[in-house]
């Protein structure tokens, strides 16, 4: 790989809402990449709890102290197409458990075949910190829907 090339990583997800697990992955990845783009997927088929505008606002606030390295954008369509558009050479993925690993491995292989060696992108897996490995947006949404205290699972910028 050309060492003069910026190391740009895309960290895609729905972030519905962003959790402390997501935050942990980005913070730990800051030393690995020159630029991290937190890419909020805009999938109309998914029934998101929060609007894309609200999710992006929360992410901006969450990473405001890192605005020199962490950027926020939205996309629709294939993540790998977004990576090409942004000239990213890395795809950053967080792994909480064996199920995540199996799913992400399949996505990695599908991306490899889609790209057909025409665009080089490496997938980097970071395992969740032990303390945050059980947190998911799905669990947080369920807590919110049922009136529980969700605040310990999300950055302070995420308040309903």
Image: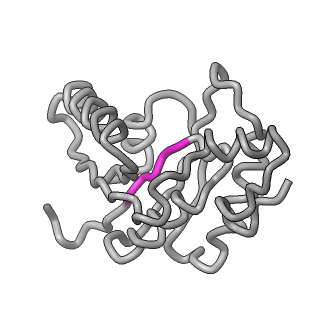
Residue pictured at 37% horizontal, 42% vertical: 84
* Residue 119 % position (x, y): 23, 40
* Residue 142 % position (x, y): 71, 39
Residue pictured at 47% horizontal, 72% vertical: 27
Which residue occupies the foreground of this view, 153 or 33? 153
Q: Of all residues shown, which one is farthest toward the top?
A: 45
* Residue 3 % position (x, y): 18, 71
Residue pictured at 32% horizontal, 68% vertical: 6
- In this rendering, the answer to whether 21 lies above or below 140 is below
Which residue occupies the foreground of this view, 129 or 123? 129
Q: Which residues are magenta?
A: 9-13
The answer to whether 108 appears left or right of 15 in the picture is: left
Specify the quadrant that holds the N terminus: bottom left
Dominant secondary structure of the residues highlighted in magenta in the image: strand
Give the total of numbered labels.
0
- In this rendering, the answer to whether 147 lies above or below 8 is above
Residue 87 visible in the snapshot = no
* Residue 61 % position (x, y): 72, 68
């Amino acid at each position: 790989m050309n060492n003069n090339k910026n190391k740009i990583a895309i960290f895609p997800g729905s972030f519905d809402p962003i959790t402390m697990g997501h935050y942990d992955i980005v913070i730990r990845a800051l030393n690995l990449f020159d630029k991290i783009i937190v890419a909020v997927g805009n999938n109309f088929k998914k029934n998101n709890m929060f609007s894309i505008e609200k999710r992006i606002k929360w992410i901006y606030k969450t990473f405001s102290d890192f605005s020199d390295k962490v950027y926020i954008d939205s996309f629709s369509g294939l993540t790998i197409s977004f990576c090409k558009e942004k000239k990213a050479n890395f795809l950053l993925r967080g792994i909480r458990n064996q199920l995540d690993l199996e799913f992400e491995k399949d996505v990695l292989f599908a991306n490899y075949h889609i790209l057909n060696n025409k665009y080089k992108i490496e997938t980097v897996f970071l395992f969740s910190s032990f303390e945050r490995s059980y947190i998911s947006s799905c669990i947080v949404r369920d807590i919110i829907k049922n009136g529980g205290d969700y605040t310990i699972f999300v950055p302070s910028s995420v308040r309903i």
